[in-house]
Image (spheres, coloured by chain):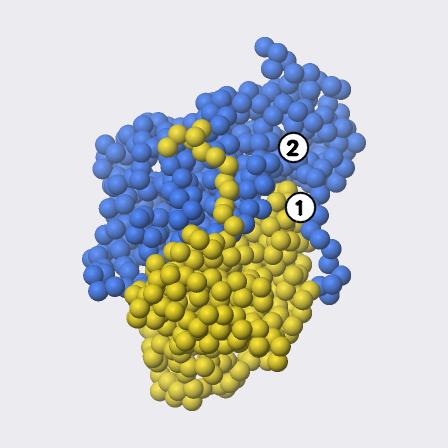
Chain colours: A blue, B yellow
Amino acid sequence: MNHLELKTLEPEQRLLMGPGPVNVYPAVLRAMSLPMLGQFDPQFTGYMDEVMALYRQVYRTRNQWTFLVNGTARAGIEACLSSMISPGDRVLVPIFGRFGHLLTEIARRCQAEVINIETEWGTVFEPEQIADAIRTHQPRFVALVHGDTSTTMAQPLDEIGPLCREAGTVVYVDATATLGGMPIEVDKWCLDAVTAGLQKCLSGPPGSSPLTINDRVAEIVNARKHVEAGIRSEDSSDADGVIVQSNYFDLAMLMDYWSSKRLNHHTEATSMLYAAHTCAQEVLREGLEAGFARHRITSQALRAGLTAMNLKLFGNERYRMDNVTGVFIPNALGDGEQVRKQLLDDFGLEIGTSFGPLRGKIWRIGTMGYVCHKANILRCLSALEIVMRRNGFAAPPGAGVDAAYKVYNQ
Amino acid sequence: MNHLELKTLEPEQRLLMGPGPVNVYPAVLRAMSLPMLGQFDPQFTGYMDEVMALYRQVYRTRNQWTFLVNGTARAGIEACLSSMISPGDRVLVPIFGRFGHLLTEIARRCQAEVINIETEWGTVFEPEQIADAIRTHQPRFVALVHGDTSTTMAQPLDEIGPLCREAGTVVYVDATATLGGMPIEVDKWCLDAVTAGLQKCLSGPPGSSPLTINDRVAEIVNARKHVEAGIRSEDSSDADGVIVQSNYFDLAMLMDYWSSKRLNHHTEATSMLYAAHTCAQEVLREGLEAGFARHRITSQALRAGLTAMNLKLFGNERYRMDNVTGVFIPNALGDGEQVRKQLLDDFGLEIGTSFGPLRGKIWRIGTMGYVCHKANILRCLSALEIVMRRNGFAAPPGAGVDAAYKVYNQ
């Protein structure tokens, strides 16, 4: 490729109704194009402090340590797990979808002794199952996913946090897919560490991971603290715990950078911080509860529409996420890839396939953040009806859209 | 803080003449505000392929595996070192500044047996010193910095790569501060793995790390390959090597994602990829050699100006980087922080302090990428003259700017 032949980037207009990334707020796109500031410019460190305050509101927490990891959602997960877990620690990971496997894998790479309990994809755990496993295995940590987009199921956490606290175990939650789209009460639910990403219901670009940890976790992390040789001063001293195996993800160093110490670590990703700042403002401007309600009714309307088109929804309806819906691909449409391709090529609309046992079995239709609006699900239902019909599956004409309208007019 | 009290982000106009981040290309700011695409949208995966091709040109390599790590420059370093180094591997790290200490620290966290050789800050190594250390210690890897901004020195690499190849050791180079500003010949100099960041001479925002590895390194990495449980298929199989301790930084998984397999890993940071794509295009549009020449003459002019102001330059002049200059802070100005503050507050101009033994001893003035232009160094020299005079150090009036002009008029 000769670089002079390249054209300016001109991304097609897409409506992103997969499980993320999704279309982002216009204000976020504008924020991304703002000029740079130095990383220790007082204005910039002021923005860092504002980001912390904003995400405390989004997470509904008073945790001081609420800040960004510079990487995608998975970076936030690894920062928490690798900073919390010392080699040999026992970690209970309940698995109800792909991302439970991811937590397991990351915990194993941290040299944890991982105990798994599993439930069928499409279901979640009863609190008593988790309490039993804690009683049996006495793990130091419990790590679990809130909403697992691979199955479109959300694990209720309001009882699990307290039962972990009661049992003296520390609980980590991956809220990548739910933050901003479904209630997460970090303090009220006794969640010790929670991470997320921008690219789902916060409607920002992927590449920044807002997280929050409480004092229990901060204490664990600080017990492993270490100061880099290149920036040590005479009063630097290391803690006794086993050093965190990652430098980039060492939360103790990140906390020194995000505190008034401003001890240099990485160079904070300026534009992504602008994005994260703006995402939180947009979510809070609408109001968290209003946003949750919008996600609920929009996904209800989508599901009513899909059902009216004679499609079958996936998973236990009590535990469905409010921002992504799994729907079985009709037999007539094979693995559903031809439909996905035509939706993208002809209608500019992206929906998702799935992973592992659900690959080619279900589509995943996202109603996340800025995408989660009536006009978008009506567009999705009508396009899907047309494309399915062209591929041999005839839904009752107009039934999907009619059913969705009805939900709004109730 | 009540979120409704927040105003829109309005970063001040800053001229960033520290050691990075720097002001970014206008085209990059525009690219950051482009809309999202799905991560497996054919247009987006096409952009990923273009990024690979572009950075092959920037790195002057034919390496297939030339792609982005989603994090700051330090993320790229850790991705390479943690994927290359297995526990117990011996790694030679020559240290000539802060970032040699960083490589040491990251390698230690990978459980390497690290051998250091050190040279005084302000100098670099002779190839023979490195050859001797290799002969004595027989390391599996050599990891070193190209340009260490903490000392403003650049280690010549043209002989070091070949001598490592000859000795059968694999060499990793941190080119964060030099890529795009000084020649780096990955293939010609036999460099096995090289990483960088956007926020220096590539003039993009921090948060994306372009790297390149050759087949020798790919083989090492693939010998440790592992497929995530959540996305395994029946023909997935793991290699025999010790698993990489990070999931996020496991280059084998990243290679599967950046190859035609497109095996899902993280969600590629869309806007940062647009930025990286545009940075490379801008650098190549000017032409690498033209860019290097611009960095050379601009830093010469800056240095002539500083010297004419009776300031003393730091470090061995033979090995100075072409994009950042260390200059001693005159005694009359204490630790120099008051001058830095007034430059920022009154002139909107940022210059850098330094780390460790050089903290409060030298300023570091960057001439990186889009910032590296005559108008900017004249603005810097004139502002510095004025602010230093107001703080008690009188340089000959106008001498700095005159001397800089003279370099251009030679």
Reading the image, the residue beneath label 1 is: B41
Q: Secondary structure at mark 1?
A: loop
Distance of mark 1 from mark 2, alpha carbons? 20 Å
Q: Are marks 1 and 2 on the same chain?
A: no
Q: Quadrant of the N terminus of chain A?
A: bottom right
Tell me which corner region of the image, top left, top right, bottom left or bottom right, holds residue B183: bottom right
Kindly identify the residue that appears in the image at 55 percent across and 20 percent down: A297
**Left or right: residue A360 compared with residue A200:** right
Reading the image, the residue beneath label 2 is: A329
* Residue ranking furthest to the right: A390
Residue kind at label 1, given as amino acid type = Asp
Choose between A7 and B353: the one closer to the eye: B353
* Residue ranking furthest to the front: B397
Count neighbours of disc 1 (C-alpha within 10 A) and say few if under 14, some if 14 to 19, many if 20 or more.
Answer: some
Measured as percent of width and height from the top left, residue B48 is found at: 63, 55
What's the chain of the residue with tag 2? A
Kindly identify the residue that appears in the image at 44 percent across and 53 percent down: B346
Kindly identify the residue that appears in the image at 32 percent across and 45 percent down: A91
Say which of marks 1 and 2 sits in front: 1
Measured as percent of width and height from the top left, residue A362 is found at: 60, 34
Measured as percent of width and height from the top left, residue A2 is found at: 73, 65
What's the chain of the residue with tag 1? B
Choose between A395 and B10: the one closer to the eye: B10
**Left or right: residue A401 compared with residue B370:** right
Residue kind at label 2, given as amino acid type = Ile
Kindly identify the residue that appears in the image at 55 percent across and 46 percent down: A34
Count neighbours of disc 2 (C-alpha within 10 A) and say few if under 14, some if 14 to 19, many if 20 or more.
Answer: many
* Residue ranking furthest to the top: A410
Identify whether B68 is placed above or below A60: below
